[in-house]
Image (cartoon, rainbow, N blue to C red):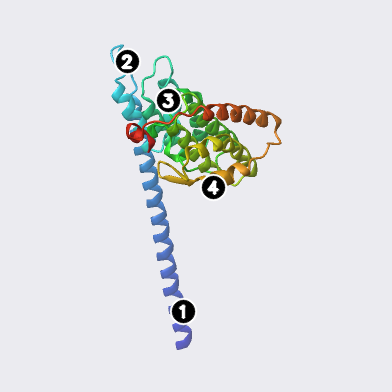
Amino acid sequence: MNAVSVGVLTALVSLSGVLVSVLTTRQANRRLRQEHADEEARLRLDAAMRAGELFSAKDDNPADPAAVVSGLLALTKLDNAELAVALLVDLWSEKEPQVAPETAVLVIDAALRSTGNAQLVAAELLCRNAHRLNSCHSLHWPSAVDGDWDPDFCPKTKLLLIDALIGMTLAHPSTEDALRSVAVRLYGVWSHDKNPRVRGCVGRLIGSVVPALRKLGYLDFMQGKETVLLCELEKAAASGTHNPDGYLDRMVDDRCKKLCSWAHACEQVDPASSLATAV
């Protein structure tokens, strides 16, 4: 065997050693990552079970309200929003509520920011209890859809959220604050969702309140972190179209009529007395 052959053989042996070392290291790293993921999942499950214990009654006494709130919020932080919103169905009952609306909305907000079935359950729960919320209170509406919107919501989730907004609005007297609030929130849906059917329906809803907005004499409207110009609202209203789905179209017709009548009765309020609820 000549010197060249020996050199080549030596290089191949060295290369093989390097490859084996790299593969061994890669496998070890992969195993460590899996172990870390498994450990994190175990810790999350353990924490979720501990949070669940906060809902348990002791000595035939109902669970402490503060513990219930802590448990719900802890579940949302542990990526268990679906479980939290499922528990909320019973805890936020109308007859014997165990949580305040503000807490319920925080849980719903976390669920809307998650994925899967939790979004739909949260939207349905919000719609079911919309009449118990006040559109002028920022803590009574999920920040995930307050001037913002996820266009990837499933169609039913979108429908429930929009109907919840209308239901919450109509449940209270028409005031300047409430009128501004519903207009900006509806515009948030219209501007973020590019689905022509959604924009067409929401445009019609916005058109129901635009005449009342013009009477206020303002050119811009603020709700939370969003500011919308009157001309933008008018543009959205002009895009309103009828929905090919006859049932949904009749539903939008009904909400538009009610919203128009509600907005027509708008009463101005003292800005100084309503500042805390207008932002």
Name the image quarter holding residue 274. top left
Say the numbered circle drawn on residue 62. Answer: 2
User: x and y percent of residue 154 in the render?
Assistant: 58, 38
Say the numbered circle drawn on residue 231. Answer: 4
User: x and y percent of residue 237 in the render?
Assistant: 59, 41
The amino acid type of the residue labelled 3 equals: Leu
**Earlier residue among tags 4 and 1:** 1
The alpha-carbon separation of the residues under discs 2 and 1 comes to: 78 Å
The amino acid type of the residue labelled 2 equals: Pro
User: x and y percent of residue 241 in the render?
Assistant: 67, 39
Q: Residue at x 39, y 43 (%)?
A: 38
Q: Dot 4 lies on which element?
A: helix
**Earlier residue among tags 3 and 4:** 3
The amino acid type of the residue labelled 1 equals: Leu
Say the numbered circle drawn on residue 88. Answer: 3
Name the image quarter holding residue 195. top right
Q: Nearer the viewer, residue 260 or 53?
A: 260
CA neighbours of label 3 inside 10 A, class few (<14), some (14 to 19), many (20+): many
Q: Nearer the viewer, mark 3 or mark 4?
A: 4
The alpha-carbon separation of the residues under discs 4 and 1 comes to: 78 Å
Check whether the beta carbons of the residues at disc 2 and disc 4 lie within 8 A of each other. no
The alpha-carbon separation of the residues under discs 1 and 3 comes to: 70 Å
The amino acid type of the residue labelled 4 equals: Cys
191 displayed left or right of 86: right
Q: Nearer the viewer, mark 2 or mark 4?
A: 4
**Earlier residue among tags 1 and 3:** 1
Asked whether the viewer can see residue 1, the reply is no
**Earlier residue among tags 2 and 4:** 2
Check disc 1 and report the residue beneath it: 9
Say the numbered circle drawn on residue 36. Answer: none
Q: Dot 3 lies on which element?
A: helix
